[in-house]
Amino acid sequence: MKKKQNNYAYIDSQNLHLGVQRDLGWDLNYKKFRIYLREKYKVTKAYMFIGYISDNKVMYQRLQEYGYILSFKPVLISKEGEIKGNVDADLVLQVMRDYNNEEFDQAVIVTSDGDFYCLVEYLYKRNKLLKVMSPYIKTCSVLLKKKAKEKIVFMDNLRKKLEYKRKSTA
């Protein structure tokens, strides 16, 4: 009997959010995205690495209800008001914690950030990389494109499936 796939997603939340909203011009429906990850890539655990802002408690609660495992990072706010969470090390550390888990099959890394080049390379060489999901081809690191090769997918063609549509109040 064939073993059921048990893949984990590791999501760079700021990169995903900005990539879809700023670069593609639409809002991601995180509930639909979690379902998509489960159905398309057999993702049983979806870690979301996110900067913690106390005003966003309701949003964090909803994300957990949708099935995400949130990993919070303190944020830094620049003089210009830009918020930065610096989740890269936490994401890599979680992948390494899960790597030897018997239940873990392969990883889906959600980012466009070239800082994950060495992680993608490591997983790729060991057949532990299922996909790299990048929000937008134009902002995706050349390093990731080279290293992930045929395992990279871009989210620009997923708008119809994953866009958050605001309910009209009329």
Image (cartoon, rainbow, N blue to C red):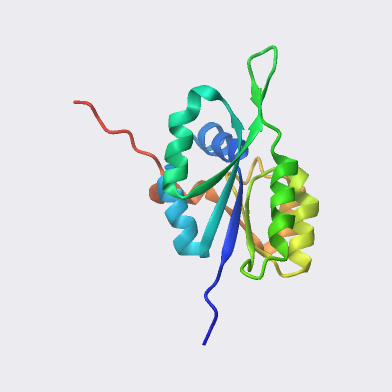
Query: Is residue 162 visible from the viewing direction of this image?
Result: no
Residue under the image location 72 percent in, 70 percent down: 127
Query: Which of the 4 image quadrants contains residue 164?
Result: top left
In screen coordinates, is 97 left or right of 70? Answer: right
Residue under the image location 78 percent in, 59 percent down: 121
Query: Which of the 4 image quadrants contains residue 74?
Result: top right
Residue 55 position, x and y percent, is 49, 22
Residue 169 position, x and y percent, is 22, 26
In screen coordinates, is 17 left or right of 31? Answer: right
Count of residue discs: 0
Residue 62 position, x and y percent, is 42, 39
Query: Which of the 4 image quadrants contains residue 77?
Result: top right
Residue under the image location 70 percent in, 66 percent down: 128
In this view, 170 is above or below 88: above
Pick the quarter of the image with the C terminus. Answer: top left
Observer-nearest residue: 154 or 56? Answer: 56
Looking at this rendering, what residue extends furthest in the left direction? 170
Observer-nearest residue: 91 or 163? Answer: 91
Residue under the image location 42 percent in, 42 percent down: 29
In this view, 11 is above or below 72: below
